């Protein structure tokens, strides 16, 4: 019971830190407005991550294409993690670091939105995909835990979520 209570309290503590941080709240607000504007203009959302972040990417895409909170028209969203044939073909032919950037090249267009999710912030394939997205004129949102690549990511992406409690990163993304 103690560990369960600890896990729940850690989750609450992390979320309270976000609620009390005006910078993070402003970034979340900016990201929400960016997504709304892009989707209203008929653009799509491409989402990528590895491991648990791949699951987060698929869940987010499902909520946009399906339903979140209320009935509405489905919204165009693609989890770049979901097609195992594409992922394994690109990994085999170009290397795993290119599994998302090649899909961004194939599917992305100017003013679409790319969302990269990385617990560490050091995933080469999500960083490369974000760079490719920016070069192609996609809006870029990058969710990650503060880590070694923080300054690189600040210069590359427009949106960051920084977490100090690594085990709660997925919970907050």
Image (cartoon, grey):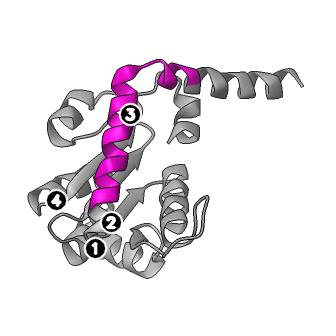
SS state under label 4: helix
Mark 3 vs mark 2, foreground winner is: 2
Quarter-of-image position of residue 162: top left
- In the image, is 92 to the left or to the right of 110? right
Spatial CA distance of label 4 from label 3 is 20 Å
- In the image, is 116 to the left or to the right of 135? right
Question: Which residue: 34% across, 69% down?
Answer: 91
Residue corresponding to mark 2: 39
| Residue range highlighted in magenta | 16-37
Give the mark nearer the N terminus: 4 vs 2. Answer: 2
Q: Is residue 117 or residue 43 the one in the foreground?
A: 43
Question: Which residue: 17% across, 52% down?
Answer: 131
Which label sits on residue 161? 3
Which label sits on residue 132? 4
Q: Is residue 16 or residue 142 the one in the foreground?
A: 16
Spatial CA distance of label 1 from label 2 is 5 Å
Residue corresponding to mark 1: 42
């Amino acid at each position: 019971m103690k560990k369960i209570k600890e896990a729940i309290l850690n989750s609450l503590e992390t979320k309270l830190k976000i609620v009390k941080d005006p910078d993070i709240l402003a970034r979340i607000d900016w990201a929400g407005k960016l997504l709304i504007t892009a989707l209203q203009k008929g653009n799509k959302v491409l989402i990528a991550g590895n491991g648990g972040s791949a699951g987060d990417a698929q869940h987010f895409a499902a909520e946009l294409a399906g339903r979140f909170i209320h009935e509405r028209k489905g919204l165009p969203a693609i989890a770049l993690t979901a097609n195992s044939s594409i992922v394994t073909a690109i990994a085999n032919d170009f290397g795993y670091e290119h599994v998302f950037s090649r899909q961004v090249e194939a599917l992305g267009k100017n003013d679409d939105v790319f969302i990269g999710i990385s617990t560490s912030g050091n995933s080469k394939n999500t960083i490369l995909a974000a760079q490719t997205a920016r070069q192609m004129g996609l809006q870029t949102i990058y969710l990650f835990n503060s880590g070694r690549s923080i300054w690189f990511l600040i210069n590359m992406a427009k949106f960051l979520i920084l977490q100090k409690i690594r085990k709660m990163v997925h919970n907050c993304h």
